[in-house]
Image: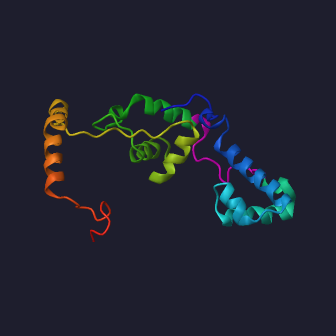
């Protein structure tokens, strides 16, 4: 799935980096009030260790010490290269020699290596894809032989009979259903 803007509107219109910075700045307000690390970590869904690091940065630089300093590393693909990658992805996997129409991280990694001579790990491919608005799509897997009509008929006609026989034949099968049945 592709999102049109770099801003994720599903979460209040803020990017992930902006949300993280807002959490750190909220922690700074709590530091000023004298709240403890455990209480802050419990209220803001973060680890106590993160709050400890933030408190140390806050002591050294105040609230400005908790502001984002940007990404820790530069992206391996430039904006122009990523635009070219988008074009290659639009062509589909068949155009690049794969037998079906599924883009997997391993296939995208291979495509990046072939096209741009840049090495990524399979897990590392996900980061630039997500940063540029791609989301993970998982196809529903169903057996080719599956007959949906037969499944529905079995659920409506056969399963109630099996369930009724099963319940009659094993009363108290679970020790929690009846007190003292242990």
Residue 104: image quadrant is top left
36 to the left or right of 130: right
Exactly how many numbered labels are in the figure? 0
Prevailing secondary structure class for the magenta stretch in the rendered image: loop
Residue positioned 54% across, 42% down in the render:
130
What is the residue that sits farthest to the bottom in this orientation?
182
Q: Is residue 89 above or below residue 38?
A: above
Residue 5: image quadrant is top right
Closer to the camera in the image, 166 or 73:
166
Counting from the top left corner in percent of width and height, residue 161 is at: 13, 42
76 to the left or right of 150: right
Counting from the top left corner in percent of width and height, residue 122 is at: 44, 52
Counting from the top left corner in percent of width and height, residue 9 is at: 62, 32
46 to the left or right of 173: right
Q: Is residue 72 inside the magenta stretch?
A: yes
Residue positioned 79% across, 66% down in the render:
56
- Colouring chosen for the image of the structure: rainbow
Q: Is residue 140 above or below residue 33?
A: above
99 to the left or right of 123: left
Counting from the top left corner in percent of width and height, residue 27 is at: 76, 55
Residue 148: image quadrant is top left
Q: Is residue 54 inside the magenta stretch?
A: no
Region in magenta: 67-80
Closer to the camera in the image, 25 or 38:
38
Closer to the camera in the image, 90 or 145:
145
Q: Quadrant of the C terminus?
A: bottom left
């Amino acid at each position: 799935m592709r999102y049109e803007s770099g801003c994720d509107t599903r979460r209040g219109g803020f990017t992930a980096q902006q949300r993280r910075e807002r959490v750190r700045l909220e922690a700074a307000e709590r530091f000023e009030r004298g709240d403890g690390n455990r209480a802050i970590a419990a209220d803001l869904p973060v680890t106590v260790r993160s709050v400890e690091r933030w408190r140390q940065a806050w002591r050294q630089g105040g609230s400005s010490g908790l502001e984002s300093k940007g990404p820790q590393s530069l992206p391996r693909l430039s904006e122009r290269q990523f635009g070219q990658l988008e074009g290659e992805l639009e062509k589909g996997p068949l155009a690049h020699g794969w037998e079906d129409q599924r883009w997997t991280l391993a296939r995208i990694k291979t495509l990046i290596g072939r096209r741009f001579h840049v090495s990524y790990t399979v897990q590392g491919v996900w980061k630039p894809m997500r940063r540029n608005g791609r989301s993970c799509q998982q196809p529903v897997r169903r057996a080719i032989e599956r007959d949906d009509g037969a499944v529905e008929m079995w659920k409506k006609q056969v399963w109630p009979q099996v369930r009724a026989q099963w319940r009659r034949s094993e009363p108290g099968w679970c020790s929690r259903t009846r007190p003292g049945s242990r």
